[in-house]
Amino acid sequence: MNEQRKEIRLDYKHTIIIELEAEQPDDGEEVIAICHSVDVSSSGLQLTLNQPVEPNRMLFISIILEQNSAEQLADGGNSPERFNLVAEVVWQRAIPDSTEFRTGLTLLHSEETHFADWQAWVQRQL
Amino acid sequence: MPAFPEHTEVLATKLKRFTNNQKPLNVAESKETFIRFYQQLIDQLTPHCDLNNQLPAVTERLADGYWALGSAMVNPAQPLHAFAEELCYHLPRWLPNRGRIGREFPTMVNQFLALPTIGGQLDGTQLNKLTETLQGYRESITTRSLALEQRQALAEQNQQKIQQTQRDLVATINRLLTGQYLPGWLSEFIRQRLAVDFIPLKVTAEGKATVDLWLDLLRHLAWAYKSKHASEHEAHQHQSRVYEELPGVIDTIDQRFLVGLPDRQAYEQILESVMASLVDCIRKGPEEAILFKPINTEITTEKLKLSTTKGVKESLTLTVNEWYFIRNLGEPSSTHKLFAVDAAKDLYQFSDYYGKSTQSLTGDQVTLLTATKKLLPVPCHSELFFKMVTAFIQYEEKRAQRALTAAQHRTEQPKPISDTTEQQNSGSPAAESNPSALTQDHAQPLPTGINDELATSVIVKSEQEIAQFADQIKSLQLGAWLQFRQQEPEQQKLTLKLPSSDKYVFTDRWGRKTGEYRLQELLDRYARDLLSILSQGEQFDSKLEQIVRGQRR
């Protein structure tokens, strides 16, 4: 079984920005993917990507909240615009009859990220 | 109580030298090294990440506690030693679990952190109590695990019984039908469905009755279609038998044939076809039939590849009830106990801390994992501390020897720069502006195991520079790039700063982990001019900002 999250999942479709390749000081340009979540929880999220990524890669992601969305309004308009986080790829599988991949990410606790804010936000949605 | 080797006294005497502030060693540096060795020991055990918040404090407390004992730390009767040893059992094995059982170990760890100290040392009485509680917990977990493992082993035995049943059943069908004539559709059905669907039925009383009914039917079918392929005389006799016996056989076919079967509709249809076909046998003679070919038992029984001789040889080194670190492809290392070996199938069954089956490996897989060092025994927890202290002593002795050699060198040369240092730092601004830095007794290598390549390098930065660099490291943002010299890859990106510990996790540009360092380790590298900062890490956030703004527009 791929899904390992134990927390309650919310079927929220957020725009996710992922840095698939970072810009290295003297080598290579940054590669960013824009996709959507399938569901989210306080510890991770599931999304659809149009390219394969191996498990264990640690990627910078940003979860974008739509302005005036139902979730944001329900949160009293207090939600930040976005959550910058670090996530690790846990699993990925090809979606049948599609060129896309369902991808599972777990969020990693790190300083300078919105990890705690994200957890608090998810809690408020429950 | 653990038994240390006979030369414990020698070790204690040596330790005394380092803990009593004897020259030429600096006791503060020795303590720092000791703590670093201890941290390494804990890191080697790869504890579960759920303990990350507690472990730095635990490690520091244990290391401090040991250091406070001085040379007495090697006494096996020390309460701290019994606790630390017990902790070393749990650390590589513990996993989060639902309910109280999953919380017990972290709770006991917290109790350890809250233990009072008396005169700088942990309260021995309370520590002994806590150790006993932890040991009791281990025993209860072990008992529970064994029960679960036994159930799993039993399930495996049942699986073997089922396979034997399947072989027996296939043999019976083959004996009844091989060389006999049956319509093609019926042969195919028997081969594809009966041999598979009947297996689970055979192990229940109700299902067994169904199987017996079908086998009885097969006995009749074995001769029902014979006449077309018999001599005239035999055909005549056969026809008589058809008239006499088949009406009775058809009458016996009813709902009892369907009890327990998985796909009643399919079997109902096949029974109707069988009855219609048998009625035709009576009315107008049997339909076209073909020879029934025996069912290949290899097709229906699970194929288990027997290991090669090499595989058996290598994997025999694994011991039942011992624990192993296993790192499967694409997964981090995890700890498993080998709880059963099935020699006939060449299968190795592993379980976790709570006795739950985690994986089964074939002999070939075990051989491959062992050969590639992805399957390694968990070190015996009772030896770990002693080995660490021995390594620490050896390291300190080498350091003392180096300090002595450096002192002799200084008295011989007016400008004391070692050959290697001179080569490494010719033209280096740091070396020019801080010549005194090169003369300091900083020639200590990092502990063996942290990084052997660094062991021979020499410190070229002043304390002031190192302090400034520490501030720079602390102010780095995620996404910063650092240049690691003498390491692959040289450029690494700061991807995680773990809260409540001073660990920094680095990756390559694709997010693949390249290293994890404590602040002190980074400073050690910088001090040896093996590390520099390439960027502060502001790009990611600002670039995201641009993209997000673009999205919103």
Image (cartoon, rainbow, N blue to C red):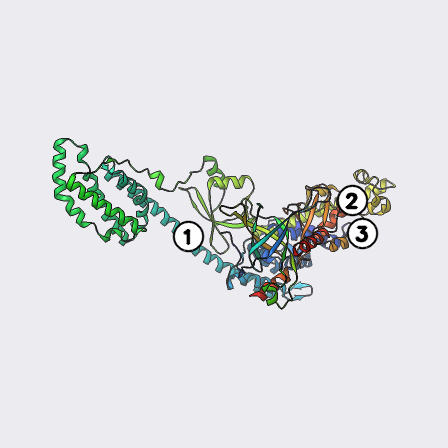
The local secondary structure at tag 2 comes to helix
Q: Which residue is mark 2?
A: B404
As measured in the structure, the alpha-carbon distance from the residue carrying label 2 to the one carrying label 3 is: 22 Å
Residue lying farthest to the front in this orientation = B553
Q: In this rendering, does residue A15 appear at all? A: yes
Whether marks 1 and 3 lie on the same chain:
yes
Q: Which residue is mark 3?
A: B463
Q: Which residue is mark 1?
A: B152
As measured in the structure, the alpha-carbon distance from the residue carrying label 1 to the one carrying label 2 is: 61 Å
- Relative to residue B158, is residue A4 drawn left or right? right
Chain letter behind tag 3 = B
**The N terminus of chain B - image quarter:** bottom right
**C-beta proximity under 8 Å, tags 1 and 3:** no
At a point 28% along the width and 48% down the height, the residue shown is: B267
Chain letter behind tag 2 = B
Q: Amino acid at mark 3?
A: Glu
Q: Quadrant of residue A43?
A: bottom right
Q: Quadrant of residue A70?
A: bottom right
The local secondary structure at tag 3 comes to helix
